[in-house]
Image (cartoon, rainbow, N blue to C red):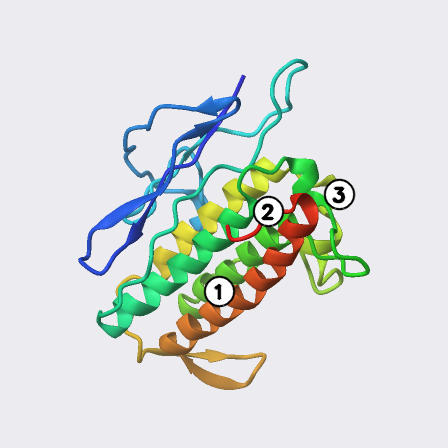
């Protein structure tokens, strides 16, 4: 029976990276996995079994159907790290972005797939799983498609189905979507690595030159907005607050 283990590290003001997520398996905590060597992945796609980048160690297995009698998958626990009070601009931006990534995951921690799918604040169609799927699209779009110029498509939506990440959570596999989200964060780090904040790219839809700095600030703003949604959704689901 395949299990999922999510272990990550986050950038701190000293340049060291602290533990992001505890090793997690169905039914309890599992051992921390060792680092794997990274091999090329076709078309720049993330492969859970093959992709490890500095700052976010990812070790997961392929999702599978739950066997009868086994405990259901739940979203793993997350340890949030506080952003530094004094740091350089790039380090500060990366630390706050990581903090908000972790905050979204913390709002989901401990919930089952069915709870994550709940549209808990009707008539809104927002769900915690929908937010995870949406932010995977956002990470992919801004860092990989825009900043790095990669030719990558959408994960869950399309021009004909622009809200697919929110609309189709009823048939989504939560464990797989969490793995995809973590993978897109890794690939976003790769896309931004080595690019200065003043470096620019042309956004064809907005017909404008944009800087890497703008992308970081926008990502922090978008996470902050959706984490407010996640606060309300989580409280409606099980009453939990302050996560």
SS at mark 2? loop
Question: Which residue is more in the foreground, 148 or 95?
Answer: 95
Q: Earlier in the sequence, mark 2 or mark 1?
A: 1
- Residue placed under numbered mark 1 in the picture: 145
Alpha carbons under labels 3 and 1: distance apart: 28 Å
Quadrant housing residue 20:
top left
Task: Please tell me whether mark 3 or mark 1 is closer to you in this view.
Answer: 3
Looking at the image, is 60 positioned above or below residue 105? above
Position of residue 23 in the picture relative to residue 160 (left or right): left
Q: Earlier in the sequence, mark 2 or mark 3?
A: 3
**Residue occupying image coordinates x 41% and y 69%:** 147
- Label 1, residues with CA under 10 Å away: few <14, some 14-19, many ≥20: some
Alpha carbons under labels 2 and 3: distance apart: 23 Å
Quadrant in the picture for the N terminus: top right
SS at mark 1? helix
- Residue placed under numbered mark 2 in the picture: 240
- Residue placed under numbered mark 3 in the picture: 170
Looking at the image, is 115 positioned above or below residue 214? above
Looking at the image, is 148 positioned above or below residue 70? below
Q: Which mark is residue 99?
A: none
């Amino acid at each position: 029976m395949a299990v999922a283990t999510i272990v990550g590290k986050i950038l701190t003001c000293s340049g060291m990276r602290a533990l992001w997520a505890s090793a997690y398996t169905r039914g309890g905590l599992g051992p921390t996995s060792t680092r794997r060597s990274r091999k090329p992945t076709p078309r720049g796609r993330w492969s859970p079994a093959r992709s490890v980048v500095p700052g976010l160690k990812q070790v997961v297995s392929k999702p599978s159907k739950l066997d009868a009698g086994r405990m259901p998958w739940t979203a793993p626990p997350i340890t949030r790290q506080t952003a530094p009070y004094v740091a350089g601009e790039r380090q500060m931006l990366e630390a706050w972005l990581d903090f908000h990534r972790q905050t979204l995951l913390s709002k989901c921690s401990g919930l089952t797939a069915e709870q994550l799918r709940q549209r808990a604040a009707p008539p809104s169609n927002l769900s915690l799983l929908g937010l995870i799927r949406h932010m995977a699209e956002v990470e992919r779009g801004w860092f990989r498609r825009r900043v790095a110029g990669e030719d990558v498509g959408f994960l869950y939506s399309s021009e004909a189905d622009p809200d697919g990440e929110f609309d189709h959570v009823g048939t989504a596999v939560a464990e797989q979507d969490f793995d995809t989200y973590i993978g897109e964060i890794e690939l976003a780090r790769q896309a931004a690595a080595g690019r200065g904040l003043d470096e620019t790219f042309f956004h064809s839809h907005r017909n404008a030159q944009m800087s890497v700095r703008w992308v970081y600030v926008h990502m922090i703003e978008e996470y902050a907005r959706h984490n407010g949604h996640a606060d309300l959704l989580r409280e409606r689901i099980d009453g939990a607050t302050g996560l």
